[in-house]
């Protein structure tokens, strides 16, 4: 098997028995699958070539070594040239694993990680960006500059990837999601940052607390208020304690308030209002092989709500509850939601952006509903929620919250249609038919 070398053949390899070929990164080479190559280039060129390889059609199937580290080599290459690995023929790519992927993989990034399970997807620190960290592999394969946390969370939940090690935890501004924060002590009464500390003493005789300097008179120490001479610490007075004094409102206080000022948008965050995000190093998960090699795929795109059931269970419950409510004169509410233009949205922004959207939407809905409510994903874009014993007045609250959320969706491409039906209904005799009619009403 030939090893392609980009740049000068390194000393390390020139004396080996390996079959080497000097190449340039042209269309012919990029049209090949399972290439093994060694880069011997300057940093800038190397990073450019690395991202070019991963952007190409078969980049995910390549194995790329470098001769020296560069900014992106830790994230986009298989590390420094490993002569042992290269000379052990049985390990050579195209590997047995690669041969099992017949068609273009449905997730190239996952395929890249699966081909060599020691590969990691790691976050890279980029101080100049307000996100502080980004995943170069996610940037390339899914065109995501800002980390899609909900998407990653779903992949972990589905065992497609595994969180190996927490690399860092970053807190972000509540207002603009910037990680450029400055933690500063402030006065608890007027919030000014213009505060100073001083040592204070506490007189046991009269309880007076004041600046330690005021207790010193000539050679002895006495209380400036009751004038008792203070001889023994712990008997006459307390150890010095640190106090703050505000230069703005002149309030004295023991504990300052820590706030996080955003360097990007100037918003003053209280510390508990910050969003905290953990950045992990990920490796391939146990279900990745099945996901990559089986045609029978579970969709990653489903709306997952707690209390979610299959359509048949939902229909059966609906029919049963309807009968019960007719007999006992209860009132229930059925809500139907349709997400419109999913295909256009995915075409324009990609799968990951849609999964981010749908996960945020699920979170929003879950916060609205009760644990006794039942939901079901009816089709790719339609789902129903049954709210037993629910007044119609609750509907307006739900409608407000859903339209609040819809307002936050950053694309005008996606839109939501929400309809509701009061139950029980005497027309509801055959639940599957009845529900299917409700679904058509969502199309109007
Ligand atoms: Zn103050
Ligand atoms: Zn005193
Ligand atoms: Zn901000």
Image: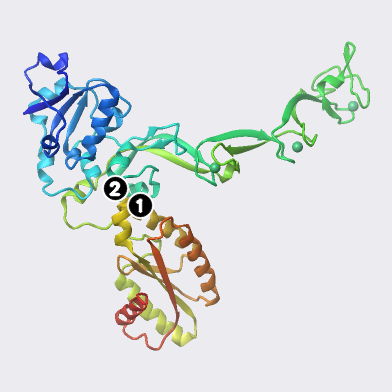
> Are discs 2 and 1 less than 8 Å apart at CB?
no
* Front one among 21 and 225: 21
Identify the mark at residue 159; answer none if there is no mark: 2
Instruction: Tally the marks.
Output: 2
Q: Judging from the image, what secondary structure is the residue with disc 2 in?
A: loop
Residue 181: x and y in percent read 55, 36
For marks 2 and 1, give the CA distance.
20 Å
Residue at horizontal 46%, vertical 65%? 371
Would residue 367 be visible to someone looking at this image? no
Indicate how the structure is coloured in the image: rainbow
N-terminal of the pair, mark 2 or mark 1, is: 2
Image height check: is 347 above or below 50? below
Residue located 50% across and 38% down the image: 179
Point 79% across, 37% down: residue: 249
Q: Looking at the image, which is closer to me, 405 or 91? A: 405
Compared to residue 228, the image places residue 133 above or below, namely below
Q: Quadrant of the C terminus?
A: bottom left
The image position of residue 315, as x and y in percent, is: 33, 76
- Answer whether residue 401 is visible to the viewer in this image: yes
Q: Quadrant of the N terminus?
A: top left
Q: Quadrant of ligand 2?
A: top right
390 versus 133 height, above or below: below
Q: Cβ(mark 1) to ligand 3 < 8 Å? A: no
Q: Is mark 2 within 8 Å of ligand 3?
A: no
Residue indicated by mark 1: 353
């Amino acid at each position: 098997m030939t090893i392609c070398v980009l740049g000068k053949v390194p000393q390390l390899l020139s004396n080996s028995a390996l079959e080497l070929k000097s190449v340039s990164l042209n269309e012919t080479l990029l049209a090949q699958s399972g290439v093994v190559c060694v880069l011997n280039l300057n940093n800038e060129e190397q990073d450019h070539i690395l991202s070019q390889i991963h952007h190409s059609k078969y980049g995910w199937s390549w194995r790329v070594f470098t001769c020296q580290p560069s900014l992106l080599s830790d994230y986009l290459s298989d590390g420094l040239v490993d002569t042992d690995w290269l000379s052990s023929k049985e390990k050579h790519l195209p590997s047995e694993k690669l041969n099992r992927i017949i068609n273009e993989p449905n997730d190239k990034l996952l395929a890249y990680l699966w081909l060599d399970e020691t590969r990691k997807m790691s976050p890279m620190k980029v101080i100049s960006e307000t996100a502080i960290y980004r995943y170069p592999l996610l940037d390339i394969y899914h065109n995501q500059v800002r980390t899609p946390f909900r998407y990653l969370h779903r992949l972990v939940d589905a065992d497609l990837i595994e969180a190996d090690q927490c690399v860092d935890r970053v807190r972000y501004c509540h207002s603009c999601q910037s990680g450029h924060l400055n933690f500063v002590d402030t006065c608890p009464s007027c919030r000014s940052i213009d505060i100073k500390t001083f040592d204070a003493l506490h007189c046991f005789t009269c309880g007076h607390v004041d600046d330690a300097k005021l207790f010193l008179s000539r050679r002895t120490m006495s209380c400036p208020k009751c004038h008792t001479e203070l001889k023994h610490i712990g008997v006459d007075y307390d150890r010095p304690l640190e106090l703050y004094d505000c230069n703005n409102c002149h309030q004295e206080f023991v504990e300052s308030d820590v706030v996080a000022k955003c360097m990007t948008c100037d918003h003053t965050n209280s510390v508990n209002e910050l969003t905290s995000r953990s950045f992990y190093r990920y490796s391939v998960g146990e279900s990745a092989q099945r996901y990559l090699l089986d045609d029978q795929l579970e969709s990653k795109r489903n709306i997952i709500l707690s209390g979610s059931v299959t359509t048949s269970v939902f229909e059966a419950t609906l029919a049963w509850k309807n009968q019960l409510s007719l007999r006992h004169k209860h009132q229930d509410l059925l809500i139907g939601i349709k997400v419109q233009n999913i295909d256009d949205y995915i075409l324009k922004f990609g799968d990951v952006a849609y999964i981010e959207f749908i996960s945020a939407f699920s979170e929003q809905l879950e916060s609205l509903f009760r644990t006794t409510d039942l939901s079901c994903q009816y089709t790719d874009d339609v789902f129903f929620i049954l709210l037993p014993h629910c007044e119609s007045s609750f509907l307006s609250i739900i409608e407000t919250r859903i339209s609040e959320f819809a307002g936050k969706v950053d694309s005008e491409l996606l839109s939501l249609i929400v309809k509701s039906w009061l139950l029980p209904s005497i027309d509801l005799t055959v639940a599957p038919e009845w529900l299917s009619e409700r679904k058509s009403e969502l199309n109007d």
